[in-house]
Image (cartoon, rainbow, N blue to C red):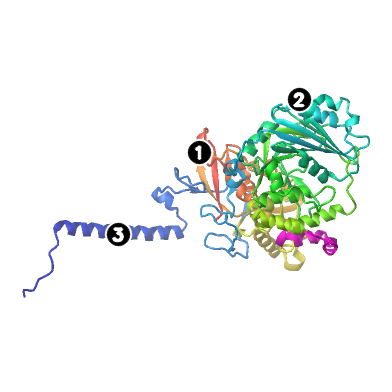
Amino acid sequence: MVKRGPRQQPLSAIIYTFALGTLCGIFIALSVLLVFLTHNGASAQALFGLRVADATGRSDSQITEIKLPDRPLTDPEPAAGSNKDARGLVVKTQDSAASKKSNYPYPTDPSWYYPEARTVNPPKTPLNTASVILACRNEHRYLQNTIDFLIENTPQEGLKEIIVVDDASVPTMASSMAREPSSYGSVLRFIVKDKSDGLMNARLSGARAAEGDVFVFLDCHVRATKGWLEPILKHVNENFRRVVTPSIPALDENFTLIPGTDTIGQFFEWSLDTFHWLSYDYSIVLVMAGGLFAMSKEWWFESGEYDTGMRGWGTEQFEQSIRIWCCGGEIVLDRASVIGHRYRSKDTEPVPYVNPEGSGLLNKVRAAELWLDDHKFKFYKSHPDGKALLEKNFDISAMQKLKKDLQCKPFQWFVNQFRAVFLAHSMIVDDFAVTDCTWHRYEKKFIGIVAWMEPEFPPKDHLYSEVGKEAAVVEAKARCAAMGVICAGITCDDKACTPRKGQWPNFLKESETEVSYIKHCCHYAEKPGYYFSQEAFLGPVIQRENVRATRENIAMVFNRCEALSELCAGVTCDETSCSAREGKTGLLPSPAGEKEISYVKQCH
């Protein structure tokens, strides 16, 4: 057998192999160079002209690292106690299905707040008619106006009926009307009770007698404006499990709408004693106003009406709102539907409904036991006496069965969905806190409201007398950083330094002797010639005026953007000022060119 020598390679193959080896060598060299430059602070983008996707997914222009102005002064030392993963986020196991989106630094997608995120779930047949249900007790002064404005401003074909539930008024509501009730025809109906049964039960009676496709629950002291019903019908025909609230401006004593008093929806405190009116540009409603709302007849009964174990009124709007969200529904505001409301107090005129003794606490305990789950201990911190009710024939079994039948999500789902609002109100711990922060010093300024949260971060003054002034500053900064977006910075006087929230109205105020340090903990990628279209704010805690500042004070705007967490995508500046912006539209080319510049927030 003849021995064969090495197989001869064609010339083309030799050239190919050489070229491939050369390319691989160049690639390896560039990779090493890139790693070297990255670790030495150089920008690969600046060197190679690479285009990379920013936080909004755009990749049509370069991103450069932001350069802060010379003032305010910056303290170089980082906060202690960092416990971050490779992205710069505190390590946490998140149980939300919507968490850890690969291209977003927060556990919840902010598009949840936008109309495009609404569920489409139309009814089997069109919902064309509405029953307006008015639960009234001694509302003689306002009922006539309420009915007349409803008749005048509602399309005849859409108004099935107005049902007035007279909850044992003296004299009867019908007898006190200036106009004979029968003159309205069959559209006006009265249900008269011999004994007052409370606001919720009065509404239940009206709903069970109603014949319209949609139930509209209103107080008896409201003024419906032209075009109020049409948006509501549109919504419930898109999703029969969607609850709609109108825009609700206040009415003066002459039943005239007061401009600028519109309300959106409410938010609560863990005590369930206080509810705050929210203010923002979104249409999502977390907790609806209990007096004015609309929902399909089908969803009203399917979702369980009211908790019939409650008494009088109060807290029912919280319980019902959480139930709607967690059990497959949603609540939205339509600003095109406007119904004015006459707000009253015992100081100005009698409030017609007087609650049974003990009903206030009972209703709160029922709501807490039904929905707050692992958070209910926070409720009982404010109401330790509420636990005694659990031993007195306390029964929520019917509502628990309803939750099971509707396959309702746990309360933590609600917290996760509206995480930004909970954080802004210091209701939950910021588990995604970024603690490697930059600090900006402001002489003769103080930051309003002490930052704290029980039990994780009780109020604390870092006293010079205990650790010395320098150590007190460092400790206060570390504590503030660990709180995440709950804490805006620290303020130091002649005795101590204290972490502060920086919430309205005292974000940063004048002081003769104090000094403050404002933090920002995210990175911001510069986008010349682009802008975010809409300001981000969340009243009342982060007011619109607090998210704006001059370009020299851009650090303050970064701070407010971070306080808004996922509701703020970045900052846009013109030639004179900057403001925090939401990211609904993404970055848009600026008509002003590079005179306008945006900074995309990156909290990885």
Give the residue number, with chain letter if any, for mark 3. 24
The relative height of residue 252 versus residue 57 in the rendered view (above or below) is: above
Q: What element carries label 2?
A: helix
In the rendered structure, which amino acid carries the disc numbered 3? Cys
Q: Quadrant of the N terminus?
A: bottom left
Write the residue at 75% across / 49% down.
318
Give the residue number, with chain letter if any, for mark 2. 152
Write the residue at 54% across / 42% down.
598
Q: Position of residue 236 (x, y in %)?
A: 65, 39
Looking at this view, is 530 or 466 the one in front? 530
Looking at this view, is 472 or 376 the one in front? 376
Q: Is mark 1 on a helix, strand or loop?
A: loop
Q: Nearer the viewer, mark 1 or mark 2?
A: 2
Of mark 1 and mark 3, the one earlier in the sequence is: 3
Looking at this view, is 521 or 428 the one in front? 428
Cβ–Cβ under 8 Å for marks 1 and 2: no
Q: Where is residue 396 in the image (x, y as percent from the top left)?
A: 77, 58
Write the residue at 67% across / 59% down.
429
Report the Cα–Cα distance between label 1 and label 3: 38 Å
User: Any magenta on residue 460?
Assistant: no
Of mark 3 and mark 2, the one earlier in the sequence is: 3
- Disc 1 packing (10 Å; few <14; some 14–19; many ≥20): some
Give the residue number, with chain letter if any, for mark 1. 529
In the rendered structure, which amino acid carries the disc numbered 1? Gly
Cβ–Cβ under 8 Å for marks 3 and 2: no
**What type of secondary structure mainly makes up the magenta span?**
helix
Which residues fall within the magenta stretch?
A: 372-395
- Disc 2 packing (10 Å; few <14; some 14–19; many ≥20): few
Relative side of 280 to 256, left or right: left
User: Any magenta on residue 374?
Assistant: yes
